[in-house]
Image: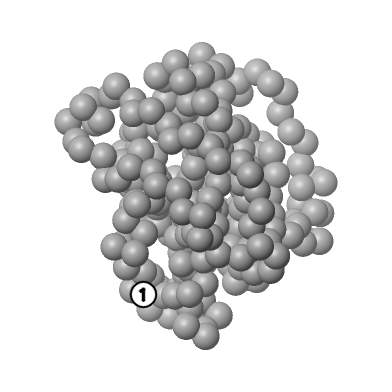
Amino acid sequence: MKHRNSHLLVGYWSRTRRGRALPDQADIDPRAIKRMLSHVFILEARDVANPVYRLAGTTLCDRFGQELRGIGFLSLWEARARETVALLLGQSLGAKLPLCLSTIGETTQSGMVEMETVLAPLTFGSARPQRFLGITQFLGDSTQLGGASIALQRLMGAKTIREGEPFRSDYDPPAPPPLASSRAANRTSHLRLVVSRDSPTLHCELDQAMKNAMESFTFASPGLVR
């Protein structure tokens, strides 16, 4: 993981387990992650072939140019990545481990930005994990999007996340500038990005199942796939 907020979210998820394999959605306190809320989402994934946004922060909705609640998560990916992403979601739920997806977001005008999405499994009133607490961060210069909305994401890599070695990355991405959209104009942002250096100790590791999935995946050419 590159972004510090990704580490902070997984650290919060891990602490919230309180000795259990997974936390329940009812255990998630928005106040504890309030500085990240505009990038945070809840994903319903009982059917990993058709995961749906239950909630999504204002920055994510602005970047994708629509209210994400009720929108299919896979609909925001290029067509030939969707089966692989669904497989990775299922493996994450089965392993009860968070998943980090490295992607490139593209506009219809071929503007591009590097992105990182972390999904941490949750239970929802039952023992079986069926939802994700997620966060999507924009790592590159979002001004390259030219104010346009992200039309799709291209999958560049995937890793399961395990506690381990200290986070030593020197990468400290800038906070993205606000979009001049109607949503941004009419609402005050939920937060401003504050980076903490007291980050949890986490380590990303690509397991064999995900290696096999990624080896079978053919990446798209640089052009936009509609």
Residue 133 in which image quadrant: bottom left
As drawn, 98 above or below 109: below
Pick the front one: 114 or 79: 114
**Residue type at the position of mark 1:** Asp
Quadrant in the rendering for residue 188: top left
Q: 215 or 5: which is nearer to us?
A: 5
- In the image, is residue 77 above or below residue 221? below
Give the residue displayed 43% in from the left and 35% down from the top: 175
Residue 21 seen anywhere in this rendered image of the structure: yes
Q: Is residue 41 above or below residue 19?
A: above
- The colouring scheme, among rainbow, by chain, secondary structure or one colour, is one colour
Q: Position of residue 167 (x, y in %)?
A: 64, 57
Q: Nearer the viewer, residue 150 or 4?
A: 4
- In the rendered image, residue 118, in percent from the top left (x then y), is placed at 54, 53
Find residue 124 and report its horizontal and vertical position in percent.
40, 73
Q: Residue at x 66, y 53 (%)?
A: 168
Which residue lies at the image location 48% right of the left edge and 26% below the top edge?
142
> Residue at left 34%, top 33%?
62
- Residue 182 as seen in the image, left or right of residue 161: left
**Circle 1 residue:** 27
